[in-house]
Image: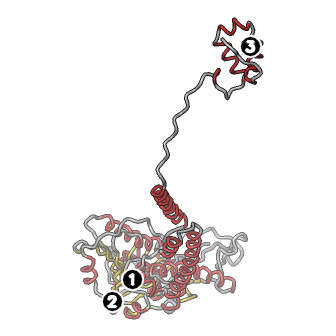
Amino acid sequence: MFSHFPLTETVRYGNIGLAMDKTITVTIGAKDGSQHEPATPRRVTALDLVAGTPWAIEPSMLDTIRAIALRENESIEALEARTGRPLQNARSVSLRGDVAVVPVIGPVFRYANLFTQISGATSLEMLAKDFTSALEDPQVSAIVLDINSPGGQVTGIAEFAAMVRAALKPVVAYVDGMAASAAYWIAAAAQEVVMGKSAMAGNVGAVLSLDLRKDPHKAEIVSSQSPNKRPDAATDAGRAQLQALVDAQARVFIEDVAAFRGKTPEAVVKDWIGGAVLIAADAVAAGMADRIGTLEEVIAGLAGAKAKPATQPNPKGVIAMTLEELRAAHPDLCAALVAEGRESGAADERARILAVEAQLLPGHDKLIATLKADGKTTGPEAAVQILAAEREVCAGRARDIGKDAPPPVPHAAAPVDKPAAEDATLPIEERAKARWDADESLRAEFGAFTTYLAWAKAHDAGTVRVLSK
């Protein structure tokens, strides 16, 4: 048979943020062992909207939501009369000059549902649409998130916070009353967090609320393949599994707000007192908010604000900080970066100086010393300057040598070529052949060149001479 049974026990771990409600409904046999036909499936109740849902909300508000959910037999009109609020969600975006004021009021739900109707709460579904409309409206130059919320469901909060962080228009979160848990997650993503003097903020952490329904005629059988599907909070193993879930959700929450606010996760846990709610002055002192002010002051300060230059989306929540802000927020990190920079800079400067010295040529010591001292000239740049200086020196030497040199000596006239027959530098054979070829009378007188060559050699040697011709 199918049935459900009332809430009788609540188990909590931690302090803030995540809550889950569990229900148990199974089919078993009757006491006498016989099987009963399943009853008609029960209707979906308001409690189903709460059960099994992770929350980041103040415990007192979660108790209120659960109490409303357990009034299953009351009509919608009765719930409305009991809460004193209208059924219709009264949230709306107002335009003050060129500043859009987007309310984040009451518990935050992922989607519009019974509770958003009853309590005038905020649904992320509608909040994201309102925020996107303000971003895309050309008449809007800046956005104020007017927050008064104890927190709400975890689902979708990180994604909406990333949307706020990546907005290309200035976004300021104004805390009017409270920004706790999931609501502070959203506020921290804005460029600035301003709080009313009596406002409160915080609840950064996670809590798991388990509602255990008991009935002697009910039992729960979990498949052997999935032993961790229903962790039993009454056992050490079950509590450890649930604690791990709470810690994992809290870690996401803490890491996000730490990045948004320029802090380390460790500093968030320590400085923000482990998830406590702080009054405005203490929240500003702890770095949870930026200043105390009024909504009118915030709107006036944003009037005519310019949109941020287009950048890539920033889903990890990287924060742009001035050097002064970085030093104030992270003195140890800045000191470590300075020390590392000095060491790295000294090594680079030594390498640069050695590279410049390697370009030294005789006579250019002064130039090398100047290049080493300027702190910027590299080895290749020094080589170019040294070569240019050396060329200038060589050109000057050439000019000086030209001034001291004697006038050039005129070249001697080139000798006139002599006929081969008269050139005494040639062998006798070549001279004799040249005469033989040129003089027909010689050929007629001697008849053969060999005869004439023998006579020419004898004549050249002085053993014969011509007496007359």
Q: Quadrant of the N terminus?
A: bottom right
The earlier-in-sequence mark between 2 and 1 is 1
Give 351 or 225, whichever is nearer the viewer: 351
Query: Can you see residue 247?
Result: yes
**What residue does disc 3 label?**
452
Q: Position of residue 427 (x, y in %)?
A: 72, 25
User: Who's the residue at 57% across and 67% down the image?
Assistant: 362
Which is nearer the N-term, disc 3 or disc 1?
Answer: 1
Camera-near label (3 vs 1) is: 3
The residue identified by callout 1 is 149
Q: Residues within 10 Å of mark 3 (few under 14, many from 20)?
A: some
The quadrant where residue 84 appears: bottom left
Q: Which residue in the protein does label 2 denote? A: 292
Say which mark, if any, is on residue 355.
Answer: none
**Rendered view: 92 above or below 380:** below
Label 3 sits on a secondary structure element that is helix
| Residue name at image x 51 percent, y 59 percent | 394
- The answer to whether residue 9 shows anywhere in this view is no
Distance CA(mark 3)–CA(mark 1): 139 Å
Residue that appears at 34% across and 82% down: 174
In-front residue for pair 388/230:
388
Q: Residue at x 39, y 93 (%)?
A: 279
Q: Which residue occupies the extreme front position in the image?
A: 467
Tell me how far mark 2 sits from mark 3, CA to CA: 135 Å
